[in-house]
Image (tube, coloured by chain):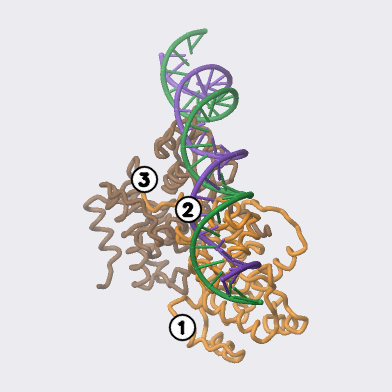
Chain colours: A brown, B orange, C green, D purple
Amino acid sequence: MKEGPDIAQIGALIGDPARANMLAALTGGRALTATELAGVGGITVQTASTHLAKLEAGGLLAQRKQGRHRYFTLADEAVARLIESMMGFAAGRGHLRHQPGPKEPALRKARICYDHLAGDYGVRMLDSLIGSGSIDAVGDGLALTEKGENDLKCIGIDVGDLRSSRRPLCRSCLDWSERRAHLAGSLGKALLSSFLDKGWARRTAESRSILFTPEGDRQFLMLFPIDA
Amino acid sequence: MKEGPDIAQIGALIGDPARANMLAALTGGRALTATELAGVGGITVQTASTHLAKLEAGGLLAQRKQGRHRYFTLADEAVARLIESMMGFAAGRGHLRHQPGPKEPALRKARICYDHLAGDYGVRMLDSLIGSGSIDAVGDGLALTEKGENDLKCIGIDVGDLRSSRRPLCRSCLDWSERRAHLAGSLGKALLSSFLDKGWARRTAESRSILFTPEGDRQFLMLFPIDA
DNA sequence: GCGATGCTTCGGTTACGATCGAAGTATGAA
DNA sequence: TTCATACTTCGATCGTAACCGAAGCATCGC
């Protein structure tokens, strides 16, 4: 009774805790070396090496050699979406590994999800964009309006450039901490990039969390208000 | 570096071939007994029993006792979506278990996906609904139009009833065989139900495929034309 | 050239989980 | 009551894969 694609293979790949941790870390979008990934997996480099080879053979990871380093990333956005959707699912089931460490609050406030903003701030941004009529939410999909295109131009984002890529402009991505949608797609990426470029926020070295400066925080909240 | 929900646990649950086969079979929407599931998993009932217990403990399955039988179903639609999305992902990676058995063509033509129509016919139906202006595709989301609501009433589907449920009306679901979207959500369910009620098609006993009668086939193709 | 660093491969150990036979429990049928 | 069916639990076996120490490559800096 074997029908359809082989789900067990990728399930097994994700099913190992060390590998799952590595994949989750790579959802941060940043390319990591084998040694760094061994750290997040809590294992030695030898073991990590075999895990990484398996993940690559399974099509989940891509690597690029640079000098004596090997940088690993998720193979493409589809992998990131799969991981995030599994996180969303797991969070809904209460399969949490409650580890209320100090980083948790920062993660919930703002973090990177592959290449766009997630967490409370990510959800707030999308809500605000929808509230102001910049984005239409139809069904479970998102579409940029003309007004939205103009507004974005004012803050230095040229949507025309983004459209030329094959990647969808707007995509909703389920946030595992907030359990609501935030904005992904090339527009989501562009927005986060602009915040970083402007110096409103910066990425942290070891975590997926994004730290806003006091000034950046102010600007962000002003730019994306929520009607109470 | 443990952050976020525990993805490894559900990955491991899906990662066993026997369990994956059972889950895939249950994506057919039909409740199956432990013995039947042992069959699809290719294992004895004892082994199946422990697998099923694990899946239930993990929140993926629900069971209901009926006499001396135990009927298992997926816990809810979220599980079905997770499985289907993993299938779509796996299909995209070429992780196919090529088993070109006789049932394959029937499965590709029309099959059930949790509770709605998938396969070539499922994709065709959505394409046709979009083409005729009954459904708006915005971004990656779907929305029923007024015209669509009227058209559906003509074939005996009252959208008002469907709206009352908390479940989304339209949802797009990636089809692993066609690699394109088909219609899920309560509307997708209602449409398939109506085909079955009308006697246009029937479900098969052992497989997920849906068999159209010659007359049903004619009616279906007429109702959902494709502009070439 | 040399040593240091980053990573992979090899070999051997270990532990976990998938598996099934056999026995035990529950429900239904006769 | 007795037997049959559907399923679970127990116990034991077995295979696989995760793991790490040690050794082997490759690349960099000097």
At x 76%, y 59%, the residue is B101
Do the residues bearing badges 3 and 2 touch, measured as CB atoms within 8 Å? no
Do the residues bearing badges 1 and 2 touch, measured as CB atoms within 8 Å? no
CA separation in Å, label 3 and label 1: 40 Å
**Closer to us: mark 3 or mark 1?**
3
* Label ID, residue A83: 2
Q: Amino acid at mark 1?
A: Arg
* Label ID, residue B163: 1
Question: Is label 3 on the same chain as label 2?
Answer: no
Say if residue A158 shows up in the picture: no
* A172 to D21, vertically: above or below: below
At x 40%, y 37%, the residue is A42
Question: Is label 3 on the same chain as label 1?
Answer: yes
Q: Output the chain of dot 1.
A: B
Please tell me which residue lies in front, B97 or B157.
B97
Say if residue A18 shows up in the picture: yes
Quarter of the rendering containing residue B152: bottom right
Q: Amino acid at mark 3?
A: Lys
Please tell me which residue lies in front, A5 or A152.
A5
Residue pointed to by mark 3: B2
Q: Secondary structure at mark 1?
A: helix
Image quadrant for the C terminus of chain B? bottom right
